[in-house]
């Protein structure tokens, strides 16, 4: 309680609370945005990548749980999809978190940015010429989860890769968003548990509480919007956001080199 009272008087807390609110509104409604936008902000400010990933995943443990429960209530979770996505995601997240404790993640950046841009363009294409959603095979779901879990640990990105690929493969957009958000909460616990042992909880700054408070306020609203947005508009929104995030990350990675 004393920690929270002290943080409330810090202007940085409110900055991150605003970031958390906006990022979670995007993440809950479109299945992505929280980690990418938060990581972009923290990296530009100057936080090291281990602190960025640990802080974001610390907040995601709670925001993801609230968002996931909200999506369950709204009927946005496909449980078969969840099981295979989580199975792949856990293995990828554990590998990524262990690597991050030994190496930096800069070598991943540009390749991920280019890939996300391609996924975003493909989603926009599918939004214009999208057939009825089909049943995605278990190995493909698990492979998407594995790649997304790895990147979640390394650079704080889950949704653009997980949700973006699931939609590109033909998954119902609201199921891709809701299921991805629920799986992300579990993945965040794994990543945070590994990283906090190396960076120490005391080094996880005011950003954790700020992101958490802001995000918790917007999570139920985001799930409500997801269940009511038209499929095509939801798909267009996801595609546009993936492209925007990839371009912002490309700018950041080039600027930081």
Image (cartoon, grey):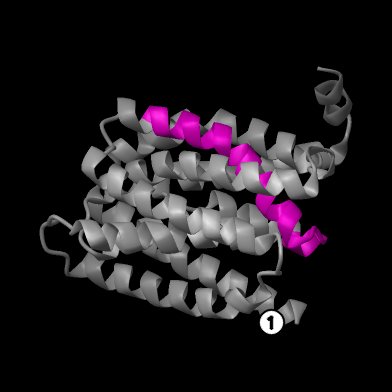
Q: Is residue 69 magenta?
A: yes
Quadrant where the N terminus sits is top right
In the image, 147 versus 167, the foreground residue is 147
User: What residue is rendered at 31% in x and 74% in y?
Assistant: 122
From the viewer's perspective, is 99 left or right of 158? right
Part of the protein shown in magenta: 43-70
| Residue pictured at 63% horizontal, 78% vertical | 107
Q: Secondary structure at mark 1?
A: helix
Q: Would you say 206 lies left or right of 238 here? A: right
Q: Is residue 11 above or below residue 43?
A: above
Q: Is residue 211 left or right of residue 164?
A: right
Considering every residue shown, the one lying at the far top of the view is 1
Residue 15 lies within the magenta run: no
Quadrant of res 144: bottom left
Residue 52 appears at what percent x and percent y?
Answer: 71, 54
Residue 153, picture quadrant: bottom right
Q: Residue at x 64, y 40 (%)?
A: 58
Q: Main secondary structure of the magenta part?
A: helix
- Residue nearer the viewer, 163 or 48: 48
Can see residue 50?
yes
Residue 66 position, x and y percent, is: 48, 29
Number of marks? 1
Q: Which part of the image, by quadrant, shows the C terminus? A: bottom right
Q: Is residue 24 above or below residue 93?
A: above
Q: Is residue 78 visible?
A: no
Q: Position of residue 230 (x, y in %)?
A: 25, 47
Q: Is residue 116 above or below residue 213?
A: below
Q: Which residue is mark 1?
A: 254
């Amino acid at each position: 309680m004393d920690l929270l009272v002290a943080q409330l008087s810090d202007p940085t807390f409110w900055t991150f609370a605003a970031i958390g609110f906006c990022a979670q509104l995007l993440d809950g409604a479109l299945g992505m945005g929280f980690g990418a936008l938060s990581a972009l902000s923290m990296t530009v400010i100057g936080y090291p990548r281990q602190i960025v990933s640990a802080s974001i995943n610390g907040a995601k443990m709670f925001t993801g749980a609230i968002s996931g429960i909200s999506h369950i209530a709204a009927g946005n979770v496909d449980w078969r999809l969840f099981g295979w996505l989580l199975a792949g995601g856990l293995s990828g997240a554990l590998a990524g978190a262990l690597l991050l404790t030994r190496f930096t993640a800069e070598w991943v950046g540009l390749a991920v940015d280019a890939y996300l841009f391609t996924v975003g363009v493909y989603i926009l294409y599918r939004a214009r010429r999208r057939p009825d959603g089909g049943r995605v095979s278990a190995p493909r779901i698990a492979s998407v989860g594995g790649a997304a879990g790895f990147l979640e640990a390394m650079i704080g990105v889950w949704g653009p890769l997980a949700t973006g690929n699931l939609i590109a493969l033909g998954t119902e957009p609201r199921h891709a968003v809701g299921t991805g958000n629920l799986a992300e909460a579990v993945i965040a616990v794994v990543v945070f548990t590994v990283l906090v042992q190396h960076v120490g909880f005391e080094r996880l700054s005011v950003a954790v509480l700020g992101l958490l408070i802001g995000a918790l306020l917007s999570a139920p609203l985001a799930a409500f919007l997801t269940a009511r947005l038209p499929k095509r508009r939801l798909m267009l929104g996801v595609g546009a956001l993936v492209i925007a995030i990839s371009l912002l990350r490309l700018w950041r990675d080039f600027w930081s080199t």
